Amino acid sequence: MSQAAFETNVWLVLVSCGNQEEAETIAERIVTERLAACVNIIGAGHPVKSFYLWEGNLQKDSELLLLIKTKPDLLPKLQERILALHSYTTPELIALPVAGGSNAYLTWVLNNTQ
């Protein structure tokens, strides 16, 4: 298969949140505003344990991870919205291109974002 066969117009954005309420608020807002087609919250009931350095100190926090599906042209607006809604000073916000997947699902993502 050629490289072009693996290219899509869908991106996966990872965002961590400190609590369920914030995770759900961000998810609901960005989906209803059509900045994302779908958001999965990982860690509800069984939080993800995050280890990281912040201001020189090791932090160990329970967090929830948002898996956000969107398209690349919405990334700047999506980032702006997440930063406005998020309580962290420097929230995790990582965007990864989706290399492939179900054609029907990828088309659905594109059709459900603005």
Image (cartoon, rainbow, N blue to C red):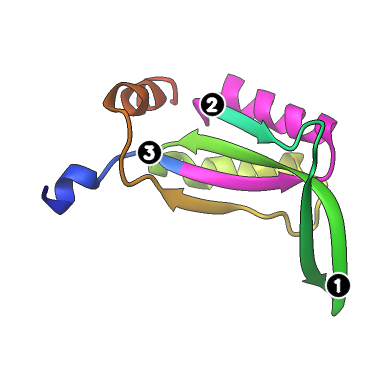
Crowding at dot 3, Cα within 10 Å, few <14 / some 14-19 / many 20+, comes out as many
**Which amino acid, by three-letter code, is at mark 1?**
Leu
* Residue 58, numbered label: 1
| Residue 55 percent location from the top left of the image | 85, 75
At 80% from the left and 41% from the top, the residue drawn is 47
- Element assignment for label 2: strand
Work out whether residue 105 can be spotted.
yes
Disc 1/disc 2 C-alpha distance (Å): 32 Å
- Element assignment for label 1: strand
Q: Is residue 22 left or right of residue 27?
A: right
Disc 2/disc 3 C-alpha distance (Å): 11 Å
**Along the polypeptide, which appears first: circle 3 or circle 1?**
3
In this rendered view, identify the residue nearer to me: 73 or 110: 110
| Residue 85 percent location from the top left of the image | 75, 39
Residue with the mark numbered 3: 10
* Residue 38, numbered label: 2
At 75% from the left and 28% from the top, the residue drawn is 25
**Closer to the observer: label 3 or label 1?**
1
**Which amino acid, by three-letter code, is at mark 2?**
Cys
At 30% from the left and 21% from the top, the residue drawn is 104
| Residue 90 percent location from the top left of the image | 74, 59
At 59% from the left and 47% from the top, the residue drawn is 14
Q: Residue furthest left?
A: 2
**Which amino acid, by three-letter code, is at mark 3?**
Val
Work out whether residue 83 can be spotted.
no
Q: Which quarter of the rendering shows the C terminus? A: top left
Q: Which residues are magenta?
A: 12-37
